């Protein structure tokens, strides 16, 4: 078999420069038919630039791209799609006011009788078939705006599958999925590769890479570092290739001293979402919250923070009952919340690091209607320094920061409101391994300083590695609170399964 028959994609000497800075420098990538090829690297390594060139959103300065031996047209998205290349983007690109089925077949709608007359029956039937095959319980007639982030991610995957791609690029496809949804996705991936479809898989989750990938290619600082079969590599070797150094310990040693109970929840419930939720979290403690998609993890955090209402139950802060109807009530009682959707909810991308950081606590830096610039600048500069945020200045637009540094800005914004307890929903979603280690270190520093921390995460190794205790949910019900000694991935999953 010659190379054009063996490889669905061949990239040779690809170079791309932005404002004199090389985002890609002589990069190569060879992807075989029917394989899962993991593309690894820290944020800023060049992965996104390479993918944008592959799908026609950007033109390279030099280099060659061959799809099954034929040159791929530069900078032509439609041409790339026609040739069978599809991509699931990390940022969800769906139309909120359209239904699930309409989003899946957007631009490729079935028609009947006359041109322009849409065949809705066919669209919904085909969408339902794809969702059923994926094992996803989502109504194809539901508008996208009513879905959770995890459900939207599954629709993105369904949309890509519907294209019958020869090469499918998946950029952080499991960032909002629970272990059960990940298992479903992996089953679909294996079915696709058995049919000869090639998958380029981008993820910061090491356990996923070694579960699903056949081959691994590493980029660092825009340069090609190397390619190896996944079976010939281990986690430490992969991390060293990605960051250029070894990370001694991903999860820091937890703080030993635990203080008073900061937050207590008793029999908390919201009709149709969750009920009977009871737990305490102490100063210096990390309480993990585990469960499958739809278990109620995010809904509980939102209710405690006043974003959603509570039908029954009671919240106590430092032993005193409190009433929280809106987020300002929660902030006043020392409760902070970092949403799972940092770009949609946590940040204003067009604003600077400084403006984003003080947005939630602006009254602390104001004298009447006027902002006291010196105090605002000083507070932001201290935050950037303490959280080790990599930015050219506090006036840099937050949209231009890496994912890990954006997440630190969101956490810093909450910390500037001086909370006693902070709830972190998917705190390392979509960030690289180096940034994960830094965020874990930051969480450890927060608990060392006496904060109570609640971590909601779909990554079981993260929960096990960071938590002092883990609250497990299934279908809106609390099924267990496990000590650090009891909490294994297998035990958590056993309690997380409905029934």
Image (cartoon, grey):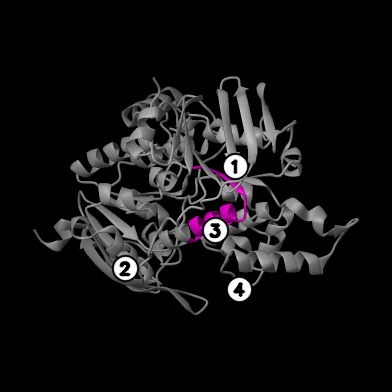
- Identify the residue at image location x=41%, y=59%: 433
Residue wearing tag 4:
392
Q: Is residue 452 above or below residue 56?
A: above
Earlier-in-chain disc, 1 versus 3: 1
Which quadrant of the figure has residue 359?
A: bottom right
**Disc sitting over residue 442 in the figure:** 3
**Disc sitting over residue 241 in the figure:** 2
**Which of the image's four quarters has the N terminus?**
bottom left
Residue wearing tag 1:
282
Which quadrant of the figure has residue 491?
A: top left
Tell whether label 3 touches label 4 (CB within 8 Å).
no
Q: Secondary structure at mark 2?
A: helix
- Identify the residue at image location x=70%, y=56%: 416
Q: Secondary structure at mark 4?
A: loop
User: Is 406 in front, or is 422?
Assistant: 422
Q: Which residues are magenta?
A: 438-456
- Identify the residue at image location x=72%, y=52%: 417
Residue 363: x, y in percent? 82, 53
């Amino acid at each position: 078999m010659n190379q054009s028959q063996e490889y669905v994609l061949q990239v040779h000497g690809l170079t791309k420069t932005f404002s004199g800075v090389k985002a890609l420098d002589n990069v190569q990538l060879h992807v075989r038919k029917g394989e899962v090829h993991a593309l690894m690297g820290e944020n800023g390594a060049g992965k996104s630039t390479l993918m944008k060139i592959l799908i026609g959103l950007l033109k390279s300065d030099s280099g060659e791209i061959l799809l099954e031996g034929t040159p791929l047209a530069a900078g032509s998205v439609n041409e790339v799609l026609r040739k069978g290349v599809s991509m699931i983007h990390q940022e969800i690109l769906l139309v909120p006011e359209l239904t699930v089925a309409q989003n899946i077949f957007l631009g490729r709608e079935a028609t009947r009788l006359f041109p322009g007359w849409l065949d809705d029956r066919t669209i919904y039937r085909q969408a339902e078939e794809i969702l059923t095959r994926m094992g996803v319980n989502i109504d194809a007639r539901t508008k996208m705006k009513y879905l959770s982030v995890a459900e939207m991610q599954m629709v993105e995957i369904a949309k890509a599958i519907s294209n019958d791609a020869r090469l499918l690029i998946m950029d952080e496809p499991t960032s909002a999925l629970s272990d059960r949804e990940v298992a479903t996705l992996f089953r679909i991936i294996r079915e696709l590769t058995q049919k000869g479809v090639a998958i380029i898989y981008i993820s910061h989750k090491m356990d996923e890479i070694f579960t699903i990938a056949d081959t691994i290619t590493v980029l660092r600082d825009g340069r090609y570092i190397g390619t190896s079969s996944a079976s010939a590599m281990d986690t430490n070797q992969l991390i060293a290739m990605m960051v250029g150094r070894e990370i001694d310990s991903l999860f820091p040693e937890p703080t030993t001293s635990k203080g008073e109970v900061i937050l207590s929840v008793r029999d908390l419930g919201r009709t149709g979402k969750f009920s009977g939720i009871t737990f305490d979290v102490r100063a210096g403690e990390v309480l993990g919250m585990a469960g499958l998609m739809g278990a109620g993890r995010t809904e509980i955090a939102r209710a405690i923070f006043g974003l959603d209402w509570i039908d029954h139950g009671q919240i106590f802060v430092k032993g005193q009952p409190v009433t929280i109807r809106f987020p300002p009530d929660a902030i006043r009682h020392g409760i902070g919340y970092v949403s799972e959707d940092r770009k949609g909810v946590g940040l204003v991308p067009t604003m600077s690091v400084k403006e984003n950081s003080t947005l939630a606590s602006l009254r602390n830096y104001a004298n009447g209607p006027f902002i006291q610039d010196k105090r605002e600048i000083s507070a932001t500069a201290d935050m950037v320094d303490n959280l080790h945020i990599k930015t050219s200045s506090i006036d840099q637009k937050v949209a231009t920061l890496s994912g890990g540094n954006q997440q630190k800005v969101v956490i810093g914004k909450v910390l500037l409101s001086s909370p006693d307890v902070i709830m972190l929903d998917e705190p390392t979603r979509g960030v690289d391994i180096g940034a994960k280690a830094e965020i874990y270190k930051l969480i450890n520093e927060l608990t060392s300083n006496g904060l109570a921390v609640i971590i909601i995460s779909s990554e079981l190794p993260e929960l096990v590695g960071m938590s002092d205790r883990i609250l497990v949910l299934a279908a809106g019900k609390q099924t267990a609170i496990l000590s650090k000694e009891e909490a294994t991935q297998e035990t958590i999953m056993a309690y997380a399964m409905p029934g």
